[in-house]
Amino acid sequence: MTFLRSVGEVIGFLLLSIFAILKGMIKSFIPKKYKMKSIDGEIALVTGGGGGLGRLLSLRLADLGAIVIVWDINEIGIEETVKLVRAAGGTCYGYVCDLCDRTDIYKKAKIIQEEIGKVTILINNAGIVTGMKFLDTPDKLIIRTMDVNVMSHFWTVKAFLPLMLENNKGHIVSVASLAGQCGVPKLVDYCASKFAAMGFDEALRMELEYEGYNINTTVVCPYFIRSTGMFDDVKSRYIPTLSPNAVADRIITAMRCNEKYAIIPGYLQILLSLKWIFPWACSAMLLRGLVKDASPSHESNESCNESATATTVEEEYAISLKDQNSAAIHQQLARRISSSERKP
């Protein structure tokens, strides 16, 4: 009986797999505009919304009718984002929140629930990068990278997921990176944090599906994005760095279509699959060929040590962001909202 039961399970698995593949193939022929859900009236929270990609996401969410909440450690950046969203006719609120402080996250989450309402869309976008060789990276910056890039996901989801479960409605978006799929020299701490963010999203999705909840999760893995202050000087060969506007558009589309994964650009999925097929020597050669140097600006700092870079938390944050919140970059990133994202 045990043998027959096992055979039955295998056959059932194969049949369900064939059904899922056919379903996916059919869906691929349906234009995305017919698969997009409306987010009009939803309350969406964007971490790291004081500039860069987070600001662009906030503008797009508001343009689609969502009530936007921006979290950032940069108060000036928050104010600018709120002004831009409101000037465009959207509804936006901003809160200063230190994502490295679990207590502050829980505190601000409670305030939001009391003052605005239940968050139904959570976009964990905030991220920082040090761009230094592993042994040259101060411990404080490694800890901060992990806190912002992955541990904050734990605390924000823990703060907002209970109410999503209560209403059986919600969407959690994790902005990871292709650096969460492949290791890159001088980005050891960054890659580790993004690998962890991907694992967090997948395990959380599996848990929610197992419990039968209708809560969607999406993990986004973009290539290097230019004009955000994080990877402006990256030396990339063959594959061009990405426009922040194009990435913001793709993230919103992935979220509205309830996609589980979004690799940007999409054709890199093929290269990622080759990583597990080719011998390691081939994969390593390919990766080194694509990215000559992920952080050229830190070349002169390779001999620095922790005592030589003992700065305040605010200074470390500014260094890690590479001044991404400067006014000039803000103006560049806050340009047009594409016509493809107008309210349905």
Image (spheres, helix red, strand yellow):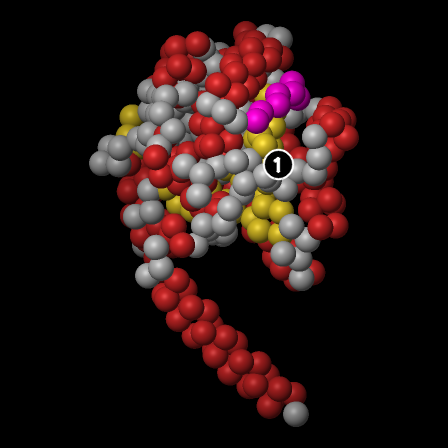
Q: In which quarter of the image is the C terminus?
A: top left
Q: Where is residue 97 in the image (x, y as percent from the top left)?
A: 66, 21
Which residue is painted at 38% across and 52% down in the image?
32
Which residue is painted at 55% across and 19% down in the image?
82
Membership of 96 in magenta stretch? yes
Q: In the rendered image of this protein, does residue 8 appear above or below residue 82?
A: below
Membership of 258 in magenta stretch? no
Q: In the rendered image of this protein, does residue 171 appear above or below residue 244?
A: below
Number of labels in the image equals 1
Q: Main secondary structure of the magenta part?
A: strand
- Where residue 263 sits, quadrant-wise, is top left
Which residue is painted at 69% across and 46% down in the image?
164
- Asked whether residue 130 appears in the rendered view, the answer is no
Q: Where is residue 118 in the image (x, y as percent from the top left)?
A: 70, 38
User: What range of the chain is rendered magenta?
Assistant: 91-97
- Where residue 147 sits, quadrant-wise, is top right
- Report which residue position mark 1 lands on: 43
Side (left or right) of 94 relative to 50: right
Q: Where is residue 89 in the image (x, y as percent from the top left)?
A: 49, 24
- Which element carries disc 1, helix, strand or loop? strand
Q: In which quarter of the image is the N terminus?
A: bottom right
Q: Where is residue 158 in the image (x, y as percent from the top left)?
A: 71, 40
Tag 1: residue type?
Answer: Ile
Label 1 Cα neighbours within 10 Å, binned few <14 / some 14-19 / many ≥20: many
Side (left or right) of 161 relative to 63: right
- Asked whether residue 97 appears in the rendered view, the answer is yes
